[in-house]
Image (cartoon, rainbow, N blue to C red):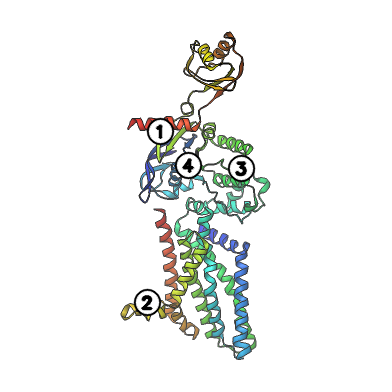
Amino acid sequence: MIKVSKLTKYYGPTRAVEDVTFEAEKGEIIGLLGPNGAGKTTIMRMLTGYFAPTSGTAKVAGFDIIEEPMEVKKRLGYLPEILPLYYEMVVSDYLEFVAEIKGIPFKERRAKVAKALDLARIEDVKHRIIGRLSRGYKQRVGLSQALLSDPEVLILDEPTIGLDPKQIIEIRELIKSLGGSRTVLLSSHILPEVSMTCEKIIIINKGRVAAISDKATIEGKDRVLLKVKGDPEKAAAALSKVKSIVSIEQAKEGPYAVLTLEGEGKADIREDIFKAVVESGLVLVEMKLASHSLEEVFLKYTAKEEDAR
Amino acid sequence: MNAIWSISKRELRNYFVSPIAYIILAVFFIICGLFGYIVYVAKAPYAQVIYIVSLMTNIFMFLSPMLTMRLLSEEKKQGTMELLYTSPLTITEIVLGKYLGAVLFFGVLFLISLEFPIFLLLYGKPDIPVMLVSLLGFALVGCTLISMGMFASSLAESQVVSAIIGFALVIVFWVMEFFSSAVSGSVGNWLATLSLSKHLESFSKGVLDGGDVFFFAAMSFMFVFLTIRRLDWKRW
């Protein structure tokens, strides 16, 4: 559905995006992950035809973005990071206007607008002026605009930015429900955001693809954070006997010892840890799974890249 | 074609939901009315069509940058340009839609401004052909001023900056004859032919000159074209 090959964009002499290549199958939800300024928006803007790449090209829904931009745009829904809303317009009029410029035939317009209102759950504010809506509602109006033409490919730039936790969950569910029939490309600078909705993650750093991988690999192995009463050295010694534990890091926090433990492969090591703690007579205060943060994932992949050079 | 109409419809409506339309209309008619009354009625009780129309033209010249400043600047600033650019529209369609929207607003102003010649008709015996030709001149120069303003609006993201650039453009072209006198030779002559006020002269005399009609059409076309080129170039 999306096939990007060697996409490059320079703003004057500054490199924004270089040599970006990736593919997305029909029905896939793909996440572009990277810090602010990594080039995510630039990639999306090239795919949507907002501006042309300096070199390289891409195919969206089977059409080349340079050769046949109109065909691409007809099959595409795009939610830019800066919401493209006319603040003085009423929600339903705005969607009506978008339907017109998207070339949706008059007869289908009403039904499509109703469907988009329903999908983004903004039915109750359709007669209100966009500028007076809350940030969350504005975001949903933006999303409904992208969904309006029932596109094969959806490109969403930071779709959950500025929303409250409840709205974030709603939008996530909505995006997940869109996958399957549509191809969704979304961007974020927050790892859990991407890992919760996407099957495949593309890490972008300084305009380049640092890694393309499935969710599990990028998130890496879960670690176990353990808090026990007593001396860290003693606790570490007790746990080092457990065979399934590969690495132990220790720290002291007041009267407690805090250990970070990593197991081998996908195995859940919590049971072994529990048993070892009980056997050695230590007092267990806390035990939890901790996933890697974006910073760690990032360092891991960008360090790899540096090594390769 | 449908897309152009959609954009201009929205544009026209946008004028009337913001205070700008009412302010421009109010300012235009208050100034025209006051000036017209004092200069042509109270002081010298002889009202001539050409004076009234040239008054309207001059006042519209000052107001036009305010009418056009938001055309493209606002879209850029609000981020809605991203919606237009990523919809199946060509830049030509976007620009023509915008231009037509502003011209339609000018059309509304023009229709209301017909009250002045109508009053002349009611209370006097104006020369009707002269009246019609001078009104045509007003309509043509209005369309040209709007195209200049739109081009100015494509240059800046800030509406104030657009208005200032638009104003500068309008003034330079209005009194091009004066500027050209500083340049000797054929260049000076060529510059003088670009003067808006010079091409309006024949209209205000009631002389319909095909060359002058062509001039305004060509100027409008040129600035619409420059706007398209400007936006196109920015994308690459």
Real-space CA distance between mark 4 and mark 2, rounded to the nearest whole angstrom: 50 Å
Write down the residue under mark 4.
Answer: A36
**Does residue B3 appear anywhere in the picture?**
yes
Which of label 2 and label 1 is nearer to you?
A: 1
Residue carrying label 3: A120
Pointer 1 residue: A302
Q: Left or right: where does residue A2 sit relative to residue A280? A: left
Q: Name the chain under label 3.
A: A
x, y percent for residue A189: 50, 38
Chain letter of the residue carrying label 2? B
Q: Mark 2 points at which residue?
A: B191
Residue at screen point 63% across, 88% down: B42
Q: Which chain carries label 1?
A: A
Q: Which residue is drawn at 56% across and 34% down?
A: A176
Same chain shared by disc 2 and disc 1: no
Three-letter amino acid code at disc 2? Leu
Q: Is mark 1 on a helix, strand or loop?
A: helix
Q: Determine the residue located farthest toward the left in the rendered image.
A: B185
Q: Which of marks 4 and 1 is nearer the N terminus?
A: 4
Q: In which quarter of the image is the C terminus of chain A?
A: top left
